[in-house]
Amino acid sequence: MRHLMSPLDFTVGELNDLFDLAADIEANPEKYRHACSGKILATCFYEPSTRTRLSFESAMLRMGGDVIGFSDASSSSASKGESVADTIRTISCFADICAMRHHKEGAPMVAAARSTIPVINAGDGGHQHPTQTLTDLLTIRSLKGRLDNFTVGLCGDLKFGRTVHSLIHALERYEGLEFIFISPEELRVPDYITEELKRRHVAFEEVIRLDDVMGRLDFLYMTRVQRERFFNEEDYVRLKDFYILDREKMSHARADMLVLHPLPRVNEIAVEIDDDPRAAYFRQVQYGVYVRMALILTLLGIGIDK
C-alpha cells in the first residue's frame, strides 16, 4: 500500500509513468470508463474546496467508481472532537482510497500512519498540495512537451502558498530550471526552501516588481493572497491587490509564455486575460481530472494496457 503526501513521494521516472497514463486517459477516456467499478473513494475535506474535491469525485465517477465523504468538518464527527486518526480508521472500513484536505499541516500524514487504505494529501494548511503540483506538471508537459530548461516565475503569496511550495520542490529535480520569485517582502518564499535551492545549486532570484521580469518568463504561476492564512485583517487588505495581471503587463510577455494559476482567483488576474491564448489556468483544471484519475489507478494498483 502506498500514500501520496508530497510530490517527492514519486521519483521523476514514476512521475513520467503517471503522466503517460494521464495522457492515455485524455486520449482514450472510454477505455477507463469502468476501471474502478466496485471501488469507493472517500473525500474527507476539513477545509472548503471546489476544484480539488470535485476533481477527485469527477475522476472516480468517470472510472465507474463511487464516492462518499464530507465537504466540511462541521458535518463530520470532527465537530464532536473525533481525532483524524480515529476518523481514518473508520473511513478505512467504508472506502478503498481516501483524499484528505485539512487546515493543519501534517494531518494527512497522521491519517496515513493509521490508515489501512491509500491516503492522498489534498492540501494540508500552508504546507503541501501534491495533487495540484501533479496537475501543474502535467499541464506544463502537455502544453510544452517537457519539464526541463524553463524560467518559471512564481508571483503573489509565496510565504503561505502550499501550491507554490509543492511546485518548487517538484520542479527543482529537473535540469535547467530557473525560478524567479515575485512577491512583497512580507510574503517571500520561506528560507528553508531557498536554502534547499542553494544546496542543490538551482538558480533563483527574488524580486518585487512583476514588470521587471515579464519578458524573461516561460511560465508565470500566479497565486492569490490567501485571506484565510492571515492573522491580521489589515495586513491582508494592504497586500491583497499588490499584483494584478492585466493586458498591459501581458504585453511585455513572450508570445509563447503561459499563465498558470491553482485557482480560485480573486482579482490577481483580470478577467480580460481569460481570452488570451496564453491563459492556461482553465485548461489546468481539466488536466487535474486526468492526473487524479491516473493517481487513483496507480495507488489502487489497477493496471490497464495502454
Image: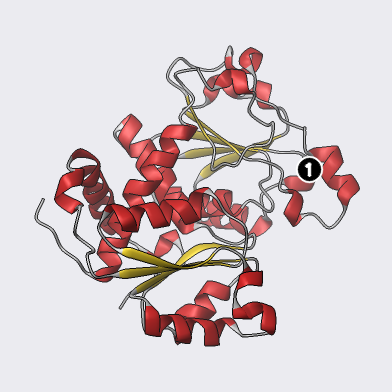
Q: Is residue 139 left or right of residue 69?
A: left
Q: Residues within 10 Å of mark 1 (few under 14, many from 20)?
A: few
Residue 57, position in %: x, y? 40, 57
Residue 60, position in %: x, y? 33, 58
Is residue 136 at least partly visible in the picture? yes
> For the view shown, which residue lies furthest in the left direction?
305
Q: Residue at x 68, y 78 (%)?
A: 79
Q: Is residue 229 left or right of residue 68?
A: right
Q: Which residue is mark 1?
A: 185
Q: Residue at x 74, y 54 (%)?
A: 228
Is residue 176 at least partly visible in the picture? no
* Residue situated in front as seen by the camera: 67 or 293: 67
- Res 11 → quadrant: bottom left
Secondary structure at badge 1 equals helix
Residue 215, position in %: x, y? 55, 19
Q: Is residue 284 left or right of residue 62?
A: right
* Residue situated in front as seen by the camera: 185 or 84: 84
Residue 206, position in %: x, y? 66, 39
* Type of the residue with mark 1: Glu
> For the view shown, which residue lies furthest in the right direction?
234
Q: Is residue 52 above or below residue 303?
A: above
* Residue situated in front as seen by the camera: 83 or 140: 83
Q: Is residue 234 above or below residue 248?
A: below
Q: Residue at x 38, y 37 (%)?
A: 140
Q: Is residue 254 above or below residue 180?
A: above
* Residue situated in front as seen by the camera: 76 or 177: 76
Q: Residue at x 49, y 46 (%)?
A: 202
In the picture, the quarter occupied by the N terminus is bottom left
